[in-house]
Amino acid sequence: MTPGRDDARRSAERWRDRQTLERRLHDGPAQRLSALALRLGVLRADAPGRDGDPADHAWHRGLDVFQSELESALQELREVAGALYPPLLDEAGLGPALRELVTATGAVARVDVADVRCGTAAEGAAYFAVAGCLAAADATPGRPGIGIRVRVEDDALVLTLSGVDPDQRRTVLDEAAPLGGCAELTGPAEITARFPCA
């Protein structure tokens, strides 16, 4: 069943909420943790020398542990924020975000994305549709890579994935349908999806 306009509007609003939450995490807690890491670096530079008594060594070990935990917490926060809505997607668009995703996953893929913007919801849904397909892709050496092509046509973001398992149509449809979009098999190993721009 295709969602009505109200359903698609609510879905688009949820995407905007995800984007807003990612920005809040980046601009709030992540910035504060980064500032704390810098202040800790200054504190370490001013700390007693490592060649002194055992108390000095304990002080430095404590600072080392604290800095390591702080950096881990910051990295985890960035990963959570990126899972909500990738920062690069918001800042630079779908092409750079998908290229970064391909690099991060180690997938073999060709990315061909027109330099256009189509709105938070469409871009976010398309990004996570591709992410789901890349996660399920067979990484067997020598296997041909996946083709990722994105265009904007008739006020919709059109995503074509080639070299993918046809079963991944469901993954793509799960992202497109809530926005009123669709995903169809357009070849033996090709899926084409439409995400209405909002």
Image (cartoon, grey):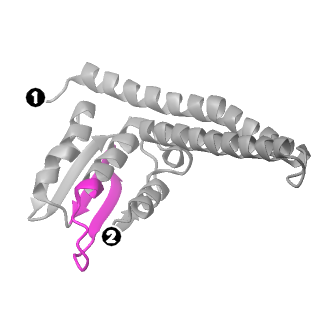
Q: Tag 1 or tag 2, which sits nearer the N-term?
A: 1
Check disc 2 and report the residue beneath it. Answer: 108
Percent of width and height locating residue 163: 20, 67
Would residue 83 appear left or right of 53 to someone viewing this image?
left
In this rendering, the answer to whether 1 lies above or below 141 is above
In this rendering, the answer to whether 162 lies above or below 117 is below
Determine whether label 2 and label 1 are within 8 Å by CB.
no
Per the image, label 1 sits on a secondary structure element best described as: loop
Residue 186 visible in image:
yes
In this rendering, the answer to whether 191 lies above or below 156 is below
x 42%, y 44%: residue: 118
Percent of width and height locating residue 5: 25, 23
x 42%, y 40%: residue: 83
Task: Specify start and end residues of the magenta stretch as a single range.
Answer: 134-162
Quarter placement of the C terminus: top left
Check disc 1 and report the residue beneath it. Answer: 1
In this rendering, the answer to whether 64 lies above or below 146 is above
